[in-house]
Image (tube, coloured by chain):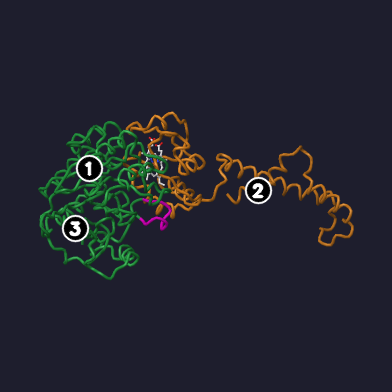
Amino acid sequence: MGLLRLLQPLSREAGREAGLPPRLSREREESSRLSAKKPGEAAGEGPYEAFLRRQEKYAAAVVLACAISAALAKTSWAGPAGDAARGETLYEACQDCHSLDKNDVGPRHRGVFGRKAASLPDYDYSDALKSANIIWNEETLDKWLTDPQAVAPGAKMFFHLDSPQDRADVIAYLKERAK
Amino acid sequence: MIDERDGGLDRRQTLKCMLWAGTGVVWTVAGGVPSSRLIGSAKAAEGSFSFVQISDSHIGFEKPANPDARATLSAAVDKVLATPDKPAFLIHTGDISHTAKPGEFDDALQLIGRAKLDVHYAPGEHDILDPKTRDAYLARFGKGATGGGWYAFDQGGVHFVSLNNVVDLKKNGLGSLGPEQLEWLEGDLKGRTDSTPIVIFSHIPLWMIAPEWGWGTEDSAQALGYLSRFGSVTVLNGHIHQLMQKVEGNVTFHTARSTAFPQPAPGTAPAPGPKLVPAGELRKWLGVREVVYSPSPATLAVTDTDLT
């Protein structure tokens, strides 16, 4: 997630009208002003060529940034990064009511990440969760684990995790290891 | 009315003792003031009787924290059978089963039946999940109970009340008794004299232990209000799978160990739930409780024993 935040200013600039972003145009002005005396510049390369070279690099960076942010934008989730290994330990608490492969007091969890809420045919969900119309992802799971009754008043789960990091870790466990 | 056989302990020392001794201390409660002494000095007085509390057997639970909850319930029954003075009856303070399946209920009945004693149950939230499981629970364990699953009985001058606080759970899973049950309780206690020793048992603690974990009962204050005039009130609960005690006026509260798996102490883990301990240590964390009643002076002595 740190990556996403780092790249955001860049992609925002890239989204401006086709002209050069402010930082680059300022650089161009500078380099044309100083070009005659600039020591590191290749012989015979004028300020315009130097600009083109930089612009190529910039374009490549924009393409990369767009690709990464597009991949990440699938979830707009900006909570803490989860540690699946720690999440596995925390999952012991969930085992009061859940297993990965067998319905317990609560529904089985394998594959729950990305699944529609209340969609197992062989578990008897509350009407509250059945009508909630949620897809389980980082954001919806974080809300659910913060306070299930706030997400679906009347749901049958009475359990929550106070710490955002604990929630992120359990969610990472469900996402990565309970596929 | 106060049992002072052990003399030198003041209230504070007593409480410390409760916290750290865990097992091996007999609790003697009279007139709401507890005192403790080491096991072994309990003498059977004329007219006294004892009963045993088991709790949270979670039959059907088979995860790492205890792969075989049947075996540990069976070990608990062995402890009951080994009690020198035969208990008058057992109470089970709920979460008999893990997922309220008929097969789990029936296995529990069979295992507990080995004790050949009357058993008085209170339901846990793992026993009543919805109307269907409530009916399955009541059919097996609700003998003499109202449709809501609560009831009272008397034994040797002590009045026992079994409450159901696991239906209609509140925030974070807090228990609740509800107006109908509270009204019933008020009526049940009405005609009784203040000197009648009262034992109340239910699954979820009737005192606020950790509201953020749902370890308490939202409307218990009202119930305790009806009990305030009685000289000796003992509250026995389960749910939290560990020993805790508290004295408030004339009321002494005790939570019991589970026979299946321990749970963390409040504040020591991010959430309640099964606590994994090294396999060889599990039975140290599980236990049964014997309560000895002696009539004059009226005392209830509570002894907790682990399953090792």
Q: Please report the residue visible at 80 percent of the width from the left and 49 percent of the height from the top.
A: A51
Give the position of the C terminus of chain A as an image quadrant: top left
Looking at the image, residue A34 sits to the left or right of residue B176; the answer is right
Residue B35 located within the stretch drawn in magenta: no
Say few, some or many: other residues with alpha carbon within 10 Å of mark 1 (under 14 / 14 to 19 / 20 or more). Answer: few
State whether residue B51 is above or below residue B36: above
Q: Which residue is mark 1?
A: B192
Whether label 1 touches label 2, CB < 8 Å? no
Q: Earlier in the sequence, mark 3 or mark 1?
A: 1
What mark, if any, has residue A82 been given in the picture? none
User: Which callout, 2 or 3, points to the residue nearer the camera?
Assistant: 3
Which is more toward the observer, B218 or B154? B154
Tag 3 secondary structure: loop
State which chain disc 2 sits on. A
State whether residue B212 is above or below residue B182: below
Which is more toward the observer, A80 or A53? A80
Q: Is residue A110 visible in this depiction of the protein?
A: no
Palette colour of chain A: orange
Pointers 3 and 1 within a single chain: yes
Q: What is the C-alpha distance between the residues marked 1 and 2?
A: 74 Å
Q: Please report the residue visible at 11 percent of the width from the left and 60 percent of the height from the top.
A: B84
Q: Which residues are magenta?
A: B264-272
What mark, if any, has residue A7 been given in the picture? 2
Q: Is residue B93 visible in this depiction of the protein?
A: yes
Q: Which residue is mark 3?
A: B297
State which chain disc 1 sits on. B
